[in-house]
Each structure stands twice: as structure tokens, then as C-alpha cells.
Image (cartoon, rainbow, N blue to C red):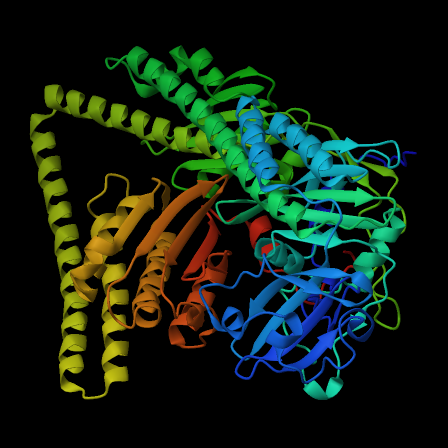
Amino acid sequence: MTAPQEPSSKSSRSLSEALVTSCDREPIHRPDAIQPYGLLLIADAKSLSVIAGAGHIEERLASDWLGQALPSLLGISRARLETPHMPSLSDVRVKGLNGETFSAIRRNSDSHVYVELEPLQEEKLLTWDIFGEIDATAERFELCPDITEVCHKGAQIFRQLMGYDRVVVYRFLEDGSGQVIAESRSDALPTLLNHHFPASDIPRQARQLYIRNRIRVIPDVSYEAAPIRPQSAGLSGMDMSDVQLRSVSPVHLQYMKNMGIAASASVSLIVDGVLWGLIACHNVTPRQVGEDVRAACRTLAGVMARQLRNKEELVTYQERLRLRNAMEFLSSRMDTQTSVLDSVRALAPDLQTLFPCDGFAIVCGTEVFKSGILPEKSNILLMRDWLRLKSNYGVFSTSNLEAVFPGAAQYPELSAGVLAITLPFQKPIVLIWSRIELVETIEWAGNPHKAGPDEQGNLHPRTSFKTWEQTVRGRAPRWNNEQIQAARRLRRTLIEDHQNQQLRELNHTLNTTLQERENLLQQKDFLIREVNHRVQNSLQMVTSFLKLQTRGTSNEETAKALGEAQNRISAIGLVHRRLYRDDHFGLIDLARYLEELMQELCLSLGEGWKQQLRLSLVSVLISADRAINVGLLLTELVINTSKYAYDGAAGPLRICLTQVNERIVLTVADQGQNSIKLESSQGFGTRMMKAVVSSLSGVIAYNNLSPGLQAVITIPIEISQQQHDFMHPDPDSAPQGL
């Protein structure tokens, strides 16, 4: 049943403002209880004596379990639990009472050993069958033409493997909400295909846990949580993020009951360290999934995630190729003997098709040349004046013009999104590509506008998931990053053409003026070089003072701190040098910058690092100030790797830079034995990194590689106000949701 809503241009904004909910602050990783289908034993890491547990241990394992030695209770050798490089207990079978047999999963912390026991399922996958299924699945994914088909095939494969009534592939969108893009189901549950879910349905801390735990199973939503006992063990509030049996938020359990689900499972789809989406499984009756099936799902999800990345990269490559060919065609037809204004007028039809649009305009002074669907001339001139103030490095883009330019609210059917290039000539020229609004009807799985906590502060999920339609107006299809980058290249080409033409004209008519102009340019260049030279000298002087101070101190900690300060100053100095060396002032090729930065760091840290360093960097243009911050983050991570992972010596270090949609992902991975200390460090460098990542509206996460640690930093290439509000929400705004 559908409940339609009156069209409203403000509806989407009210949704974005409701993203931060009380659920975002719920400590779901510290429930102090487990799901009772399994057992949890907690032992002291040194003595291996069991100090606490959860579940029906007396009835299912041993009546006198508390205080026993964990090896004897499990029937395994002590060495299996004390060997750090062999954490797996996948081959262990623990005999319980009443003929029950358990599989075992081991987790270690600094002070405790956690062992999860789950009853073995009667149906088990054979190793040969698992490998065969993975191989066949990878081949089927490769044959899929696009992302949508990969997701549909994945939903079918996971439902066949796990046996749930409904399996959906859920993709996270830019604003934090999500959409079901593929589904495989029986008649037991209704369809959710194409339905949207608000960001509040999956709180931010839950998304972090999905990255940390790739698969999560809830066999029965009606369970009664089994608390950790005895309370005298003092384990209340401990972090259970890595415990698969961890109890689920009561709000989430009620949420699933409201959906008519008795059991669920979720498998994370992680692309380049970022949570791309989820494979969500639902069943109308309780259902348990064995560890062997879960292991197969983890592997298949990794295969599927790699194919998703490949399909996305293929689409990006095809768009880049199309734009490059179109740009070459335009360049070949550019008449160097005429003005840029005359050239763009002659090439207007080709320029209009360069970026898919509904209307194209060339504005110079009070003259407006337009083609297609566009507002009146007076409105275009007002838009032109506003664009000249708002263009970022001469290029501006938006898919929601009325949100930033109030005057556009009068004509969304004529222009709702624009891509504009401003050419800074004596008589400025503005090129405008315009898209009309795309009136979109979004199907939500229930009304996403949910009430907050009740008078007692308790959270309550929504009770209805019937299709709820919302009409969104005032928005146009978004301009992708490849189109924006192509617009910047086109602007540089037109500016270069104009400059070349000006030089030719001056060469024929104003030789004296040209010489004077050249002298002025040389003087300007000299002054810039002089300023640059003095700034470099100042930075070098600061570095020299730090070196002298380092030699003059006998305190090892002080010497290390001064050495780290030298590396940070070097990172800033390298960006400064590149700013005055590159052709486009203000933008930095991040890959080239990071490569040069690592060369300098290797010289500072020691020659041994050159042989250990592996770089995989994708070229991305970002602003200089963001590049400086990324360089500081990389410098700090490499310094910390040297300090903590390898105790100052050189060791294997892999640095990767990739682009995912409108974000860049920087990963730094080592193989050190003590790397885990980085995640818990509270020193100046760690605090600085958190502050810098926050200023970039990004996130940083750590993945334990056993051995080693992988740091994943994700930041937007260019941060918009809407993204900033989402990454840094108002803590006082707390609409309810899950």
C-alpha cells in the first residue's frame, strides 16, 4: 500500500537534517551480553583461567566451568592458546553435554582470551564444494555487464548458499542513506527492491562495526540476552566489537520484529576499505548459519566487492575516454586565427554535447547566446554574476541550484543544476551547461521521518515499512567527477588558446609593449621566485634549528619529537615548492606529491626504507591546502610505523592511494608485530591526525592484519557544505531512528 506525499522541494533537505539520531550514540559494541545460541568463555591472558562467561554454560558444557583452566575445559593443549601467530581454532571440536558438539572461535586482547563456542550444524559444506562455488561465482560475476547485474547475481547466489527467505543487496548513497538495488526472495516476504532507507536506520557506529566484522548473524530475534557473569569479574562495559555472539541492540531487534523478520544475517561489501553496501538476509522463522557457511560468505563477498570495483572503474574509464576524445575533437577544430568568443560560438553544438545537458549558454558582457531549455536572458545574467563570485578555480557545479542560488527556485523546470566555466579575460566569458529538474519519486521502506526518544529517553523504531512515496523536486542529475575534471581541462585549453592569440596579436602590432610586458612578467616571476626562495630559506632555517636542537639534547624522546617536527615541516615545504613549479596554481597532483614526500622521508628515516617501500598511487588533483593535510597524515603514519611497528628499523610498508567516487582513500599498511599500539596511541601525533582528519571531513579506521596494521583514511576530494554537515552533525539534533 502506498501513502503518497505532496511534491515538495524541501523534503530532501529535511531528510538530510534528520540523519543524526539518538541511535548514533547507542553503545551497541558494549552490550555486556551475548545471543544465547552460543557460549562465551573469558579467560585471563596470563593464567588462562576462566574468569567469566555468558550463556547456558552449566547446562551445555560444564557445571564447574568458572575458575577452570581454559585448555582443559576445551580439551586442547595450552600451546594452542599461547601461540600468537596461530589464533585459529577452526579445527577444534569441543564436546558438550547432552551429546552437543561445539566449534570454537578465539579472540585475544592484551589482558583476556575470548573463546566463542557455537553448536555445529548438521549440514556442513565440504572444502572442495566451497572452492568450486567460489570459482564458479567469480566467473559468473566477471560475465556480468554492470554493477546492477553483479548485485542481482550476488543476491541469488547468497540466497542459494544461506537459504534465507529474502536476500537483498543494499548500497550506501552519498548522503548516508541506502537503496536496495538487487533482491532474491520467496513469497514469504514482500519485495524491498528499489526501496530507500534513511541513514538513521543503520547508525554510524553500526557501519563502523560492519567494516570490522564482515558477517553478522542473528538466528532468532526473540532471544533473551545472556549476560556476562559473574558481575564480580569487573568486565561490565568491555568492548565486544570483535565478538560474533555479541548481543544486539533491543531497538534493532524490535526494528526487525516490526519488519516481520525472525532471523537475519548481514555480509559487508567493502571496496578499498570503504563500506560500499550490505548483503542483508531475512527469514520469517529462526535460522542458524554455521561457521563454514559464514566463512564461505566472507570469501564470496570479497570476490563480489572486487568485481563491483572493476565495474565501477570500467564505467569511469569509458567516461574518461569519451571526454578525452571529445576534447581532442574540439581542440582540432579550434580556429587559432579568431577570438575565443567566436570559436566557442562556432563550436557551440559540440560544446553542448560535451557534457549531457538540456541547455547551453555563452555569456559575454550583456550578450547571451543560448541553445536548448534555459531561463530568460535576465535570469541568465543574474546567474552569471553570481557564478563569477562562486566558481572554484573558474569551475562551478551543482545538481541543486536553488539550494545555493535562491533565485533559481523560480525556474527549476528550466534550470535546476549547472556546470559553469568562467574565463577570466578582460571581458569575461562564462559557459553554462544547464540541466532541468528531474522530478523523482523515491520509494521509502516506511516513513523515514521518525519521532525521537520518548519522555523516558527510550528509543523506538518505526512500526511500519509499507511503501512510502516521496516526490523530490528542484534537483537535476549530478555532474560526475570526470565531467568536472574535463571542464577544468577545457578551461585551461581555452585560456591557453586566448593567451596564445594575445601573444600573436601583440607580436604583430605592439612589439614595444610586448617587450615591456615581458619585462614585467620577468620581474613578477623574479619576485615570486624571490618570495619562494625566502620562504624556502625560512623553512630550511627552522629545519636547521631543529637539527641543532636535536644534536644538543640528550633526551631521546625530545630528539625523536624534534625529528618528527622536521619531517612535518618537510611535508609542508614540498607542497610549497610544487605550487610554484606546477602549471595550475592552487591544485596539486596528490600522487606525485606523496611520491616525492616518501622519497624525502626515506632519506630522513634511513636508506633501508627505500627497499621496503611499495607505492600504488592513482593521480588525483586536489587543492593545495588539502594536499598539505594529506601529506601531514602520511608523514605521521610513516613515523608511527617506524616508531611502533619496527622499533625504529626499516620494515615492509605499503602505501596506496585510490579514488572511490568523489572520495580519495589513502591506506598505509605494515607487517610489524607491535603495530596494534598505533590504534590505541594517545600521543600528540595521534591527536594531530584525528584533528586533521576531522578538518578534512574524513574518517580514519584501523584494520588488524595479524601481523601488522592497516590505516585507512577516507576524505572527500572537495568538501561541500552538505557533506560537512553530515560528517560533523549538530550533537543537539537527535531525531530517532535505527
Q: Is residue 533 left or right of residue 365?
A: left
> Which is more toward the observer, 317 or 711?
711
The residue at the point 18 percent across, 60 percent down is 608
Image: 349 above or below 261 = above
Where is residue 328 shown, x and y percent of the image? 32, 17
Q: Which quadrant, please, contains the C terminus?
A: bottom right
Residue 101, how many percent across, how many down? Answer: 73, 60
Asked which quadrant contains residue 194, the reply is top right
Residue 62 on image: x %, y %: 76, 75
Q: Reply above or below: 512 against 36.
A: above
Identify the residue at horizontal 85%, vertical 38% (top origin): 468
Q: Toward the viewer: 682 or 21?
A: 682
Going by the image, does 720 lie left or right of 446? Answer: left
Q: Quadrant of the N terminus?
A: top right
Residue 515 shown left or right of residue 293 in the figure: left
Residue 195 in sight in this render? yes
Residue positioned 86% across, 66% down in the render:
224
- Residue 462 location (% of width, % of height): 86, 53
365 in relation to 655, above or below:
above
In front of the other: 386 or 267: 267
Q: Nearer the viewer, residue 129 or 421?
A: 129
Residue at 68% across / 27% down in the picture? 438
Query: In this rendering, does residue 576 appear at all?
Result: no
